[in-house]
């Protein structure tokens, strides 16, 4: 039996490759840190079969049976209401019941956000939770918040996203004073729509290291450590970036293959191009960064990519662990309470 | 003297490399089609010097003197008000006065939109003009509208963007029934914010080939020919794509250089990789597609990229010419009038 609050709950049925890859990712994480129990929520028979097939014989994985799954195509709130006892609900309730301190899911993002909001609620002073994702191309890393939890942002939501992501970036990117940028359609102070203008003015009044507006082309440019935006825009930016990266890497590969085919017999392109390509792909690889925390919920919720493989799930569980270690929630609460008094 | 309405007005001072690259681009276009006069608006002395330096001795370039320039950093509306007689104002007024049928500018986009809206107005039935840009990565092309003219879109604006871009895609991409997608945070019908949901419902009532919601990762995926979105989001998507492409091409170049350096003495990577890289870069190159039309204005307004070189300006002038040839405005007016009766 898992001691209260020491475990991480995992939605074993969420994601395109569930339960197989989720179970395998959990096994990796469980083997890495035997002291942290994992509770896999989902179809007991299938999870047991996957554990057996992967040769699991450890003691820190438990199963919490769940009778159904909210599919990617289900409406989040509707799905939660109709499909009682789904894997995401069961996993999230483990956090609510203090049996786990965090929940990891690669399933329906909307359902995951809705379950966390519904069952866990937000931290004191937090108005809306936001999904913070760490992105990287090349040598720079940036936290983008929100990438889809909230598509009706108000200026005060965006400010809180900035405050929460500032603390997150301090711990995760290890930057002492993260540079915060507001995603906008121009750099000048007065640019943008009403939301951007009001948020800009509010950011200037905070103690954050606010560097002002940044444009889309600067998201990956290393100018700031945190990019704040509405969830609709963040989601579109994230997915556009993903689509473009995949397409370009495919085009690069084709170009490279043609080049290699044209080399004289016996001549190889050598290891360096493979190393370079691997590092390039890794830089663009969501799995490398694991899951994205839903900052602001009372508990720990880590959202993994729907296409997560075992490595991505493993990394998402690592993020969950790290979030617990640094006790980010207390820091968020302290910061927001200080600001509001 | 130019015959009424047969010329294209060019803002010779707009853009990072103006007037030099603008004048050189104009010379190329003027040489290509001696029958179409170009009127360059701007600093007469500097334009004359550039024309002389480039060895221009043709007869179809005129100069319309303008005494100032609205800089990239100027607030658009404020800039237009304060800097009377700017090159963008003079160039746009040439269209208003029917001396030209179209205006091309690589200057401050907001000022260009404001000048067109102010001096030319919108076509009958059109509520808001939108910037339509043709994007391509690899083998697919897509028209994205709006990429920044209007950051306060209403559902009826987005529907009109769809209708206008449908006609534009028919002529420019030569697709008989362009597939229209609405940029959203999920594919399902009920996804998104209020704007997206209302627009979705309205699109379903049109006769357009509306394929529903598309996500960011599909913008460059070839699933549709036209992507409709609010100007704030379109601008961010466009610039994010631009930033990522530049960054990836740089990373890939570096990888390639390392690989080449590691090849045995005397062995070359061969022409194919260079051809592939060139074609890749061309695919990602805004200059290749010339300018983006501001659809819906009463006149022709082509917005070129701020970093336009001579080739980009040349292509933007070509787009202006093509827009005149196909008489897109009459088709837009016909279509919207039919719909409203």
Image (tube, coloured by chain):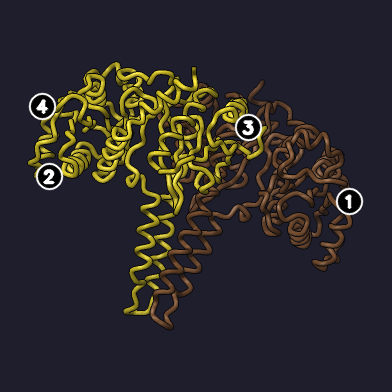
Chain colours: A yellow, B brown
Name the residue carrying label 1: B2
**B37 vs A127, nearest the viewer:** A127
**Where does the image place residue B147, in percent across and percent down from the top left?**
60, 38
Indicate the secondary structure of the residue bearing disc 2: loop
Name the residue carrying label 3: A192
Q: State whether residue B201 appears in this view.
A: no
Q: Chain of mark 1?
A: B
Callout 3 touching callout 1 (CB < 8 Å): no
Which residue of the protein is positioned furthest toward the right in this rendering? B1
Indicate the secondary structure of the residue bearing disc 3: loop
Q: CA distance from mark 4 to mark 2?
A: 22 Å
Q: How many neighbours does mark 2 have within 10 angstroms: few (below 14), some (14-19), or many (20 or more)? A: few
Q: CA distance from mark 2 to mark 3?
A: 52 Å
Numbered circles on residues, count = 4
Indicate the secondary structure of the residue bearing disc 4: loop
Name the residue carrying label 2: A54
**Which image quadrant: the C terminus of chain B?**
top right
Q: How many neighbours does mark 3 have within 10 angstroms: few (below 14), some (14-19), or many (20 or more)? A: many
Which residue of the protein is positioned furthest toward the bottom in this rendering? B266
Q: CA distance from mark 3 to mark 4?
A: 54 Å
Callout 3 touching callout 4 (CB < 8 Å): no
**Where does the image place residue B242, in percent across and percent down from the top left?**
55, 49
Q: Residue at x 38, y 21 (%)?
A: A123
**Where does the image place residue B87, in percent across and percent down from the top left?**
82, 46
Q: Chain of mark 3?
A: A
Q: Residue at x 50, y 38 (%)?
A: A227
Q: Residue at x 41, y 70 (%)?
A: B259
């Amino acid at each position: 039996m898992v001691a209260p609050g020491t475990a991480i709950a995992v939605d074993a049925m969420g994601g395109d490759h569930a339960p197989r890859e989720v179970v395998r990712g959990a096994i990796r994480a469980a083997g890495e840190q035997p002291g942290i129990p994992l509770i896999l929520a989902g179809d007991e028979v299938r999870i047991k079969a996957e554990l057996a097939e992967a040769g699991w014989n450890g003691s820190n994985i438990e199963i919490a049976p769940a009778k159904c799954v909210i599919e990617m195509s289900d409406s989040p709130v509707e799905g939660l209401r109709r499909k009682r006892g789904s894997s995401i609900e069961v996993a999230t309730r483990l956090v609510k019941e203090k049996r786990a301190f965090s929940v990891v899911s690669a399933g329906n993002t909307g359902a995951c956000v809705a379950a966390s909001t519904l069952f866990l609620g937000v931290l004191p002073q937090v108005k809306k939770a936001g999904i913070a994702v760490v992105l990287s191309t090349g040598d720079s890393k940036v936290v983008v918040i929100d990438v889809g939890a909230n598509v009706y942002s108000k200026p005060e939501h965006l400010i809180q996203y900035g405050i929460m992501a500032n603390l997150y970036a301090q711990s995760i990117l290890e930057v002492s004073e993260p540079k915060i940028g507001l995603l906008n359609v121009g750099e000048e102070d007065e640019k943008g729509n009403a939301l951007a203008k009001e948020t800009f003015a509010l950011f200037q009044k905070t103690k954050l290291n606010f560097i002002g507006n940044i444009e889309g082309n600067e998201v990956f440019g290393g100018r700031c450590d945190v990019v704040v935006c509405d969830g609709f825009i963040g989601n579109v930016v994230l997915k556009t970036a993903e689509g473009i990266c995949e397409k370009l890497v495919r085009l690069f590969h084709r170009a490279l293959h043609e080049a290699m085919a044209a080399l004289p017999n016996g001549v190889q392109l050598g290891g360096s191009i493979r190393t370079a390509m691997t590092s390039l792909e890794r830089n663009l690889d969501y799995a490398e960064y694991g899951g994205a925390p839903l900052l602001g919920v009372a508990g720990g919720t880590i959202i993994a990519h729907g296409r997560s493989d075992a490595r991505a799930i493993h990394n998402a569980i690592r993020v969950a662990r790290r979030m617990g270690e640094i006790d980010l929630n207390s820091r968020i609460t302290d910061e927001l309470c200080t600001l509001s008094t």
